[in-house]
Amino acid sequence: MNLLGANVLGHAIKAAGVGAILMLSVSASHAQSGPFAGFDGSWNGTGTVSLSDGSSERIRCRATYKVDGSNALAQTLRCASDSYKFDLSSNVTSNGNNVSGSWSEASRGIYGNLNGRAGGGQIDVFVEAAGFAATISLTTRGNKQSVSINSKGEIRAVQISMVRG
């Protein structure tokens, strides 16, 4: 290779390296931070719902999370089986790792408040409404998420595994 060709190639490699560094720094500056980091987006998966009569069924679920800044999260979780469904929505804000907000379940017309903690890809909350209370735990690791709901109501337990996309 002649000297001119080597010089042009060297400048091209340097320019590509600088461009890659700039792209990484821009991506990092726009990355989510705060207790809801990693939740934003659409998720799909399957799981089981265990009911108060002792029966359990396989369910299919879709979830959508919209993170607004670093301290607000809007969530929907819709799950259905052949004979059962629920449609859960929540709006949550954080103050550090403490979270609070409201939730509703559309198919049963119930709504209430939630309180808990979030951080490190984990959200753990206690939800309550008139005649209903449950604990909900969401864990996100990369493109995988697990959801666990436990209560003493009609729905005794829900276990869901989802992937982003």
Image: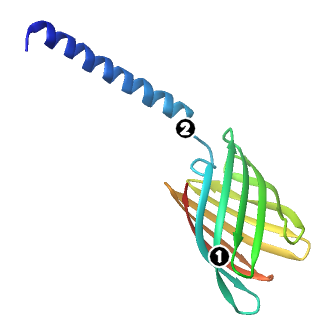
Q: Is residue 152 visible?
A: no
Mark 2 lies on a secondary structure that is loop
Is residue 159 visible in this depiction of the protein? yes
The picture places residue 5, in percent across and down from the top left corner, at 15, 11
| 9 relative to 23, above or below | above
Q: Where does label 1 land, which residue?
A: 59
Residue 100 - label: none
Task: Give residue 31's mark.
Answer: 2
* Residue in the image at 85% along x and 75% along y: 132
- Give the amino acid at mark 2: Ala
Residue sitting at 65 percent across and 62 percent down? 62
| Left or right of residue 62: residue 88 | right
Mark 1 Cα within 10 Å, few/some/many (few <14, many 20+)?
A: many
Callout 1: SS: strand
Provide residue 40's location: percent of width, then percent of height: 62, 48
Task: Measure the C-alpha gap from mark 2 to mark 1.
Answer: 32 Å
Side (left or right) of 134 relative to 13: right
Instruction: Determine contact: label 2, label 1, CB under 8 Å.
Output: no
52 versus 128 height, above or below:
below
Along the horizontal axis of the image, is 19 left or right of 137? left
Give whichever of 137, 55 is nearer the camera: 55
12 relative to 34, above or below = above
Residue 100 x/y as whole percent: 78, 54
Tell me which corner region of the image, top left, top right, bottom left or bottom right, holds residue 124: bottom right
